[in-house]
Image: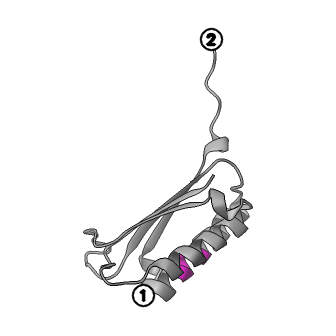
Amino acid sequence: MPCLYITTNVSMEGVDTDPFYSEVTKAVASIVGRPQNLVMVVLKGSIEIVFGGNKEAAAYAEIVSMGGITKQVKRKLIATVGSILHSHFSIHPTRFIFKVFDMQALPLPSKL
């Protein structure tokens, strides 16, 4: 069950975010190989973010998934989510940081 969490300094007040949620949910489900009904997306706007010493539109995102993350998937997620943020909120891809975390990549704790 992938969870995509995005924070941005772009104001979401008065913005119809439904098209964004729809597009990004479909993209994440398709790329990670999970059904859309198992994808969670959290979007927080109007957060104080300074990137490169200025407050121009920027975003920080992270995705946590239980499996399904390979190097190719990671690259495609970064490119696709960056493109979606740019088209919906005018956040340039060079002002976007994306952390990708696969829960299955963690070693299981010892039972000793």
Give percent across and percent down for residue 61: 46, 64
The crowding category of the residue bearing disc 2, from other C-alpha atoms within 10 Å (few below 14, some 14 to 19, many at least 20), is: few
- Residue at mark 2 to residue at mark 1: CA–CA distance: 51 Å
Q: Is residue 30 above or below residue 112?
A: below
Give percent across and percent down for residue 15: 37, 84
Give percent across and percent down for residue 52: 31, 75
The structure residue drawn at horizontal position 47% and vertical position 85%, both measured from the top left corner, is 88
Give the residue furthest to the top.
112
Give percent across and percent down for residue 46: 28, 73
Residue bearing the label numbered 1: 90
The structure residue drawn at horizontal position 25% and vertical position 69%, both measured from the top left corner, is 48
Asked if residue 13 is among those painted magenta in the image, a careful observer would answer no
Q: Secondary structure at mark 2?
A: loop
Q: Is residue 90 above or below residue 41?
A: below
The structure residue drawn at horizontal position 61% and vertical position 25%, both measured from the top left corner, is 109
Three-letter amino acid code at disc 1? Ser
105 sits left or right of 54 in the view? right
Residue bearing the label numbered 2: 112
Which quarter shows the C terminus? top right
Query: How many numbered discs, if any?
Result: 2
Q: Which residues are magenta?
A: 80-84
Q: Which mark is residue 62?
A: none
The crowding category of the residue bearing disc 1, from other C-alpha atoms within 10 Å (few below 14, some 14 to 19, many at least 20), is: few
Q: Quadrant of residue 69?
A: bottom right
Q: Quadrant of residue 60?
A: bottom left
What's the image's color scheme? one colour
The structure residue drawn at horizontal position 65% and vertical position 60%, both measured from the top left corner, is 37
